[in-house]
């Protein structure tokens, strides 16, 4: 499971090149190195599971997150491409796109708005379920993709977003 990810949020006009590069280096290039480190061994054993953690932001974008959105959209594309390469050898490659989830990052983002409670309420207003995801709910989706029950799932980006992207 590739769960590496960082943010360096700013509007695109204010985004520093080093912040753009840092996010792509960790979120996309890090995933590339992760996949490449497993590639040959999985080919030899003719089995394996790779699960990348993408984001709803890679699907729909988000103001102030051009670098993060680009990295996660790139990760989705890389997931699909590598899935096509490894499928003939029985290796599944998929991604999970969490929505707003109760993690320290959620509270950091709310804090960045200047008023944590107001920030959380504004985030919550976008959620059809009127609650945030829980880490264990995301973990269950990852577990499904990592076990034999998902043997026919290849190159998918499973949205675990509480309906956020259907709004």
Image: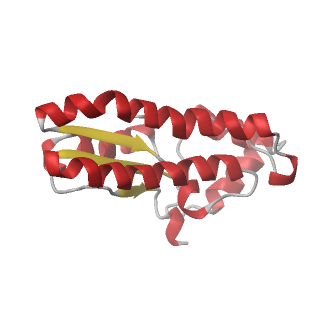
- Asked if one can make out residue 109 in the rendered structure from this viewpoint, the answer is yes
Q: Is residue 55 visible?
A: no
Horizontal and vertical percent for residue 64?
76, 52
The one of 73 and 125 positioned closer to us in this rendering: 73
Residue 105: quarter of image: top right
On screen, residue 26 above or below 140: above
Q: Position of residue 32 (x, y in %)?
A: 45, 37
Q: What residue do we see at 82% from left, 40% from top?
A: 16
* Residue 127, percent from left and from top: 56, 61
Residue 125 in percent (x, y) is at 64, 61
Q: Relative to 70, is 86 on the left or the right?
A: left
Which is more toward the observer, 63 or 77? Answer: 77
Left of 147 or right of it: where is 157? right
Q: Quadrant of the C terminus?
A: bottom right
Farthest-out residue, bottom: 167
Above or below residue 106? Residue 150 is below
The quarter of the picture where the N terminus appears is top left
Residue depicted at 14% across the width and 38% down the height: 47
The residue shown at (50%, 32%) is: 30
Tell me: 15 left or right of 133: right
Examine the image and state in which quarter residue 91 appears. Answer: top left
Report the number of discs.
0
């Amino acid at each position: 499971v590739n769960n590496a990810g960082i943010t360096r949020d700013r509007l695109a006009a204010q985004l520093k090149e080093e912040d753009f590069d840092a996010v792509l280096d960790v979120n996309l290039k890090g995933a590339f190195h992760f996949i490449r480190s497993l590639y040959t061994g999985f080919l030899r054993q003719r089995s394996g599971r790779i699960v990348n953690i993408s984001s709803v932001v890679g699907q729909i974008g988000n103001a102030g997150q051009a670098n993060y959105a680009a990295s996660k959209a790139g990760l989705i594309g890389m997931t699909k491409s590598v899935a096509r390469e490894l499928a003939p050898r029985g290796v599944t490659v998929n991604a999970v796109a969490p929505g707003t989830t109760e993690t320290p990052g959620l509270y950091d983002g709310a804090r960045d708005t200047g008023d944590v409670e107001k920030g959380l309420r504004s985030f919550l207003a976008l959620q059809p379920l009127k609650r945030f995801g829980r880490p264990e709910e995301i973990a269950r989706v990852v577990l499904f993709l990592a076990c034999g029950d998902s043997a026919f799932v290849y190159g998918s980006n499973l949205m675990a977003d509480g309906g956020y992207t259907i709004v």
